[in-house]
Amino acid sequence: MEPSAATKERTLAWLRTVSGELSTATIKRLEETLPWYGDMPPGRRSAVGLVAQAGITSFISWFDDPRSTPWIAADVFGAAPRELLRSVSLQQTLQLIRVTVEVVEERVKDGDDSLREAILLYSREIAFASADVYARAAEARGLWDARLEALVVDSILSGEYDDELPSRIAALGWHGHGEVSVLVGTAPRMLDVDTLRRTARHLSADVLIGVQGSRLVLVIGRAEQAADDATPTTGASGAGTAPRPTFTDIAKALEPGFGDGHLVLGHEVPSLVDASKSAKAALAGFAVARSWRNAPRPALADDLLPERALAGDPVARSTLVNRVYKPLKNHSTELLTTLWCYLDNGRSLEATARELFVHPNTVRYRLKRVSDVIGWDATGAREALILQSALILGSIADHDGQVGRRR
């Protein structure tokens, strides 16, 4: 029940008299019961003490006029410097509130019921107000992080690096080390950033996420890994090791987070500094992926080299020449000629053997050598298209007396 006006005035007068005593007792109790408080630098301890004192003062004002509830958080936390929110966690703040309330309750235990009820109600209000302060701070930090992440991804996609980029990446808490690859696809209607990050962490990877119009771009980096490049596992047969996932494995796991449409994975590059090269390849592949009927999801940007070259991508043209035509030409003109004949004859071993006056097994052996040199198997339909495009571009470059720059 509400106390009489005279009783309330006496209680308020008494509270104002003992407020200093309560503040001193609270600081002493903090030092005795909260180890983190004693470990703080003097300046931070002083700020925490000011918060505790402000809480007691604010309670007295609130007891005088409960309609002041909306201003509780501002009254209490206004005495603390802004950096205190970054150095004192919400859990520690709630511990501070608990200690302060305990000290006040012990001091007024012989008071009337209305005062004890007011303390309980106020402690509830201040706890919710504290949570609101931290939630607002976390929301503001999340919005800032999202803007900063978008800026970093834009810098990677454009290849326009500056001296501030490393510090921006560090501020985002990037855990990637070593190789990087860029994944480009269609943005979903509802982007679930947390699921993408959680999936990447499960595969010992980290991601930077950017949305550009209808495109969703993920910069994927490997998390720090043991020197043996494998993750220990224990199965039914006992202890063993599992190789870390490839970027293709990671991309397949992240695929559900994208919208409908094509998904293209750029080639692996040594570090985040080189990520723009993978990004340009992925973006170029994404632009022409619709021309590959039944393209896998994700498709590799390198598997879209013919389409990219036909669309005028100079990097794709130079990549085909430098990774297929030149290595074969420098290694053996015999292998180059065999590959030409094999592709011109519709990938027929017998027709190629007849044209070259050799046994089909000799053609088969040479094609195996071709695969060993360049990494592509000419017997596959898709690989045959890539290799034939490379041979055409290489012969044009030879005729023009120039070969494109390396990727």
Image (cartoon, rainbow, N blue to C red):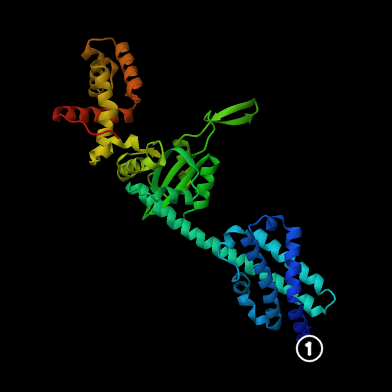
Q: Position of residue 5 (x, y in %)?
A: 76, 89
Residue found at the far bottom of this picture: 6
Residue found at the far front of this picture: 42
Mark 1, Cα crowd under 10 Å, few <14 / some 14-19 / many 20+, is few
> Where, quadrant-wise, is the N terminus in this rendering?
bottom right
The residue under the point 33% across, 14% down is 365
Q: Position of residue 4 (x, y in %)?
A: 78, 88
> Where, quadrant-wise, is the C terminus in this rendering?
top left
Residue found at the far left of this picture: 400
Q: Secondary structure at mark 1?
A: loop
Horizontal relation, residue 374 to residue 312: left or right:
right
Q: In this orientation, does residue 101 appear?
A: no
Q: In this orientation, does residue 251 appear?
A: yes
- Give above or below for 383 relative to 6: above
What is the quadrant of residue 386 in the picture?
top left
- Give above or below for 44 relative to 175: below
How many tags in the picture?
A: 1
The residue under the point 71% across, 70% down is 123
Q: Which residue is mark 1?
A: 4
Say what amino acid the circle numbered 1 marks. Ser
Horizontal relation, residue 103 to residue 402: left or right:
right
What is the quadrant of residue 132 in the picture?
bottom right
Q: Position of residue 326 (x, y in %)?
A: 25, 25
Horizontal relation, residue 347 to residue 248: left or right:
left
Q: Position of residue 106 (x, y in %)?
A: 81, 70
Relative to the observer, which residue lies in front, 252 or 212? 212
